[in-house]
Amino acid sequence: MITDRQKGQRAVRTDTNPTTNTLAVVRNLGILAHVDAGKTTVTERILYATGTTHRRGEVHDGTTVTDYDPQERDRGITIFAAAVSCAWDGHRINLIDTPGHVDFADEVERSLRVLDGAVAVFDAVAGVEPQSESVWRQADRHGVPRIAFVNKLDRAGADLDAAVSSIRERLHPAPLAVQLPIGAEDAFRGVVDLVRMRALVWADGCDTAVEGPVPEELREEARRRRRLLEEAVAELHTGALEEFCARSALSAPTLAAALRDVTRSGDGVVVLCGSAYRNRGIEPLLDAVVAYLPSPLDVPAVRGVHDGTEQERAADPRAPFAALAFKVNATSTGRLTYLRVYSGTIGKGDTVWDAGARRSERIGRILRVQADRHARVDRAVAGDIVAVIGLKSARAGSTLCDPGAPLVLEPPGVTEPVVSVAVEARRAADTDKLVSALARLAEEDPSLVVRTDPETGQTVLSGMGELHLEVAAEKLRLSHGLEVNVGRPRVSYRETVGRGVTGLVFRHVKQDGGAGQFAHVVLDVEPLGEEFEGFEFRSAVVGGRVPQEYVRAVEAGCRDALAEGPLGGHPVTGLRVTLTDGATHVKDSSEAAFRTAGRLGLREALRACAMVLLEPVAEVTVTVPEDAVGGVLGDLAARRGRVSGSTARGGAALVTATVPLAELFGYATRLRSRTQGRGTFTARPAGYAPAPAAASVR
């Protein structure tokens, strides 16, 4: 490294032809963060440091590899998850740069479903931000091990200790800081590696760190922090605790091994720091990815279902093939399906089984992906993330497997849309083209839902937020050459039970010449709780008055009735239905009759309940100059917002509030005008709350 620095050259640690082609040298990871924390810049510097690219792409210049879509470059944000591959120190790294905006959280969800590890990026000034917390919780649900990278240490007000504290307080893992910054803000020039007790310094104009002894003025502080790190690790790791008790210290190999174990178990998170924009801290980050994050061999075998029984598939190239499609993209060269291969091997021309569509598919080509650029490969093995061409039926969430060993893997979850707009082609001649284009959008992005309003006949596009729908409409124009008219966004309301009813009797009797229908049910309906979510069905029938198969039919009928509530035809949620009694007929009772009784009986019960209209709400965090707080608070109150807190940070104020989603349309423009362009806000879904016009029906 010193020689390279003296030459003023960039040292590239790559191994494009690893001598050991095993799963142990593969890392599948994602970059997660709040919008504008520096995810894409970190990704670009990783590609540069590994020699994958030969110039540093910049978000503000629109020259990044992963933000290749025209809208991403125009808006300066990541919208679509982009996969790239690179090599570092004999390891192959498959990396997915994920969006940070809440409207595209489903892109993050689909990516996390197929990843083995992640790097969470935090702003050294802001610390943990709202969307940082959201993506962290998503990773928790998928059990994805993470390391943290505190970015932008060269900014005014950057504070590593404050960022680490916010990780501890808001995300609740044990943050294990393994670096100490050398210099602060503009003077930030390197880090002290607390594991190996060495200094890494990046000189101006050089992209490679120079390794040396810890600076004299930082030695005492470095020893103190090393001691704190050893104590924290010993509390989490049994092997480290034994050595710590015996020697009152931990050796570097023991500490590194313990950090790897606690990272992979999720008991702790290793914290590194740097400045991606200035290319400082990326090489140690890559070393940490290789050292601490798991390979496909280190994660549990994937589980699937076949014929009602659960099966496991180990990450073995010789096992039967199984892969999950997590992204579909229609390109000018054909339909591209992104796969995570969990077991087995596939090659060009192989036939695979689409377990969801229940049909065979042929693999046309296999591609190693570099965002919008691709390199053909002959085969893909367990642990790979690749794209394939030739699949016709596969969708995001489809399982592809060996035809002789079928298996269905759990698909990524899809969040229910909360905002809808009416769309129509400006020219009548483009109507059929619009229908086809919308179907393709929904195919590429499962969180977009297209339907026809039965009352108005309008085509309705539903998504996760105003920006989400705005991006979809712009994509219709850019990618499909369609000019469309978009109606004002509408939110998806729900209905729930405010006050229930007991003992509602419903008899379904039908006789029309043939076999009749008879079902008698008695229902209790009550609110489920203050979360306004979910549905529970219970049976309290005794004495076998309603056979078990009819009880299941009543539950199915009740679920059918939840599709439309009595207030406005909105879906019903947040209630418990109890079947308390019933009666059957020897000849005329059937599952169909009891399902009908459950559906019609619950509808009648809901009309007898006091119903409450629910509207979606969002948790909003507004960052504004301190002199603009008063106006912002007044505007939030006018939008029916409930302010939950206000804190000062670096000359700015952070206001948190819960605001109805319907009131946030156009808020970005309003906020900019009130703060002379200095105010920003983020929002994330926070469930449902009673609408002010909540009505009761008796």
Image (tube, rainbow, N blue to C red):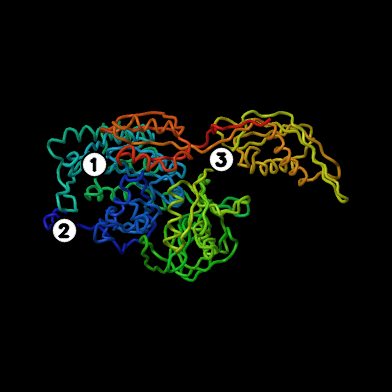
What is the x, y in percent for residue 144? Answer: 42, 45
Name the residue that disc number 2 marks. 9
What is the x, y in percent for residue 68? Answer: 35, 59
Query: Which numbered disc covers residue 153?
Result: 1
- Earlier in the chain: of badge 3 and badge 1, it is 1
- Earlier in the chain: of badge 1 and badge 2, it is 2
In the image shown, does 87 or 22 lie closer to the viewer? 87
Classify mark 3: helix, strand or loop: loop
Q: Are marks 3 and 1 in contact (CB under 8 Å)?
A: no
Q: Are marks 1 and 2 in contact (CB under 8 Å)?
A: no
Query: Which numbered disc covers residue 493?
Result: 3
Question: Which quadrant of the figure has residue 135?
Answer: top left
Q: Amino acid at mark 2?
A: Gln
Q: Give the label, 1 or 2, closer to the camera.
A: 1
Local packing at callout 2 (Cα closer than 10 Å; few below 14, some 14-19, many 20+) is some
Q: Residue pushed farthest bottom?
A: 349
Query: Which numbered disc covers residue 460?
Result: none
Q: Is residue 358 left or right of residue 135?
A: right
Observer able to see residue 542: yes
What is the x, y in percent for residue 594? Answer: 76, 42
- Earlier in the chain: of badge 2 and badge 3, it is 2
In the image shown, does 550 or 593 lie closer to the viewer? 593
Q: CA distance from mark 2 to mark 3?
A: 59 Å
Residue drawn at x 58%, y 30% as measured from the top left = 529
Q: Amino acid at mark 3?
A: Tyr
